[in-house]
Amino acid sequence: MRVGRQAASDIVGGRAEGKVAFITGAARGQGRSHAVLLASEGAAIIATDVSTQVPTVPYATATSGDMAETVRLVEAQGGRIIAADADVRDMSAMQDVVSRGVAEFGRLDIVLANAGISAPASTLEMSEEMWSTTIEINLTGVWKTIKASVPHVISSGRGGSVVITSSLAAMKASEHTAHYSASKAGLVGLMRTLAKELAPMSIRVNTIHPTTVYTDMILNDSIYRLFRPELESPSRSDFEEAARGINALPVGGTDAIDISHAVMFLVSDEGRFITGSTFVLDAGGSL
């Protein structure tokens, strides 16, 4: 397939018009934000998340009510959405929901492998379950997401885009994040290999690497303690004070919509020649 040139007038508004996006971890946070923005730009959405607590995670994970809110917000944009409770560790469940979405919407163009967890712990003291669960969700779960979905993008013959949510942690070390950092760094190797394999089909693959993003995965006591271990009961303001020391720009973090705008750029025709990229949104945190 040959990617044709488009006039500048074609690359404005409705940047995902007529396309279908599959998004994991869509019940809240970055995944919800991506779903709502893509729907506002014309995409139909296939959304998945889990509704039961992940045992090794120290904050409350998503609920069915969270996903219902994502559905409401997408539909408020005039968007169409199929939402399902499916764990990225369950290949059969992922294949089933993608197949159902493609049957309903007729195609698949965009894959956002966004689902992930964080459970800070000392490398030598974390449990085997904590290590394996993080790797299974953050790394193996992305491979399963891609294996379940990308064949549908290939079969459409139109090309497409895959965006994998990595992290600044893949590039910059912090204490108590070995399992998280290893999983996020592993995604870079996966992305680069896929980018080469899928380029002949005009399917682009990139990773995004945010600094701290104000979502439930960050705004919780375990992260506050990670950033401020010298305090007995650190607050959000204590956390933000420390986080501002990481970033070159004078901010403690970013909002989910900031990441969504970058994702929208990568999956749209504006980013049609970007593939194999580690797209960093770190407020200068890696400097």
Image (cartoon, rainbow, N blue to C red):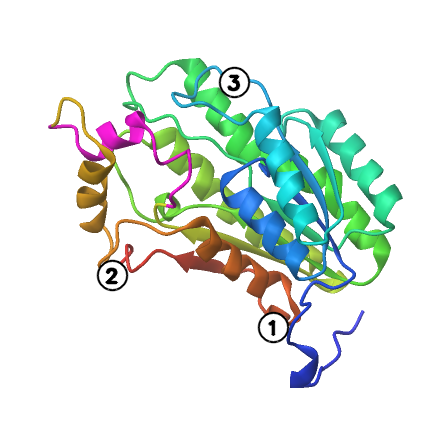
Residue at image coords 27%, 23%: 122
Distance between the alpha carbons at the discs numbered 2 and 3: 35 Å
**Quick check: 52 left or right of 81?**
left
Q: Is residue 274 above or below residue 115?
A: below
Residue on which disc 2 sits:
249
Magenta region: 213-230
222 part of magenta stretch: yes
Tag 2: amino acid? Leu
Q: Quadrant of residue 204?
A: bottom right
Q: Earlier in the sequence, mark 2 or mark 1?
A: 2
Q: Quadrant of residue 37?
A: bottom right
Residue 30: percent from left, percent from top:
50, 45
Residue 238: percent from left, percent from top:
18, 37
Image disc number at residue 270: 1
Instruction: Find numbered disc 2 in the image and state the secondary structure of the residue it sits on.
Output: loop
Instruction: Find numbered disc 3 in the image and state the secondary structure of the residue it sits on.
Output: loop
173 part of magenta stretch: no
Residue at image coords 29%, 16%: 125
> Could you tell me which quadrant the C terminus lies in?
bottom left
Residue 150: percent from left, percent from top:
74, 47
Residue on which disc 3 sits:
53
Residue at image coords 34%, 17%: 126
Front label number (3 vs 1): 3
**Residue 248 visible in the current orientation:** yes
